[in-house]
Image (cartoon, rainbow, N blue to C red):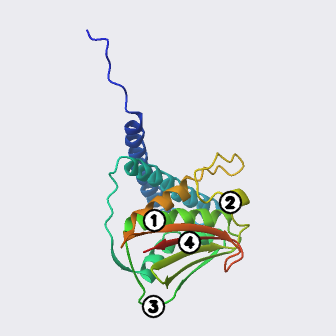
Amino acid sequence: MSDVHEGLDFSTVIASTVHDMKNSLAMLVQAHGQWQAQVPAELAHNSAQGVIEYEFARLNGMLVQLLGLYKLGVNQLPLRPAYHELEDFIEAQLARYQEVLDSRHIVARCEVEDFQLLGFFDQELLGSVVANIITNSIRYARSALLVRAWQEPGHLVLSICDDGQGYPPAMLAGQSNYVLSLNHSTGSTGLGLYFAGRIAELHERNGVRGHIQISNGGPLGGGEFRIYLP
């Protein structure tokens, strides 16, 4: 009997486990929705329901990120760009969080420079980035959230702003390296911004790659995330 054993590809095991977790979470969300439809409105729509909806979205976002980072690492994350209307894209993203926004008394709005503004991007990948940033903004916003889109020379810009306390100084200073040490007070690892940066870089046109930027003091006075797409 050979003493040589194949090494366990732990990253593949983790990716497979995360995929199973994502499927289980989807079934849990579906079952919860069916249960919610059967209970009285005063029980179905309360602050606890808002917490459940938010944590569902947050967990799903983290699992999507982990799978995406794994696929990026093994060059298995395809880019399928197409032209999309920005207003429709943004409104669809915000609609996913309407119940959570309502439960937290946060007013979210969309501003697009041109009603027919188009962007050339992978809708699924950019959607996962925007969903993650919106989820994070909901966590820190006091009462308002704003998603904007406009055209600059050579770039389409998508911005997500909130009226919270903004990004920590250390995160602003380390924009060249978003994967930070674990912050035990917030649970942040910087992986969300790292994932967003990698997705932005996948979008390339005429030698110009997309990129992201974070800052404080945007239109709502809090944090502002921007993704620039060529």
What's the residue at 70%, 66% (across, down)?
166
Residue 124 vs residue 155: left or right?
Answer: left
x and y, in percent, of residue 210 in the image:
46, 68
Amino acid type at mark 2: Ala
3 vs 2, front mark? 2
Q: Which of marks 4 and 2 is nearer the N terminus?
A: 2
1 and 4 marks in contact (CB < 8 Å): no
Amino acid type at mark 1: Ala
Label 4 and label 2: CA atoms lie apart by 16 Å
In the image, residue 219 above or below residue 53: below
What's the residue at 46%, 79% (across, down)?
156
3 vs 4, front mark? 4
Label 1 and label 3: CA atoms lie apart by 23 Å
Res. 128 image quadrant = bottom left
What's the residue at 37%, 41% (across, down)?
16
Q: Which of marks 1 and 3 is nearer the N terminus?
A: 3
Res. 20 image quadrant = top left
Residue bearing mark 1:
200
Task: Give the label on residue 226, or none.
Answer: 4
x and y, in percent, of residue 167 in the image:
69, 63
Q: Earlier in the sequence, mark 1 or mark 4?
A: 1
User: Is residue 44 among what the camera can see?
Assistant: no
Amino acid type at mark 3: Phe
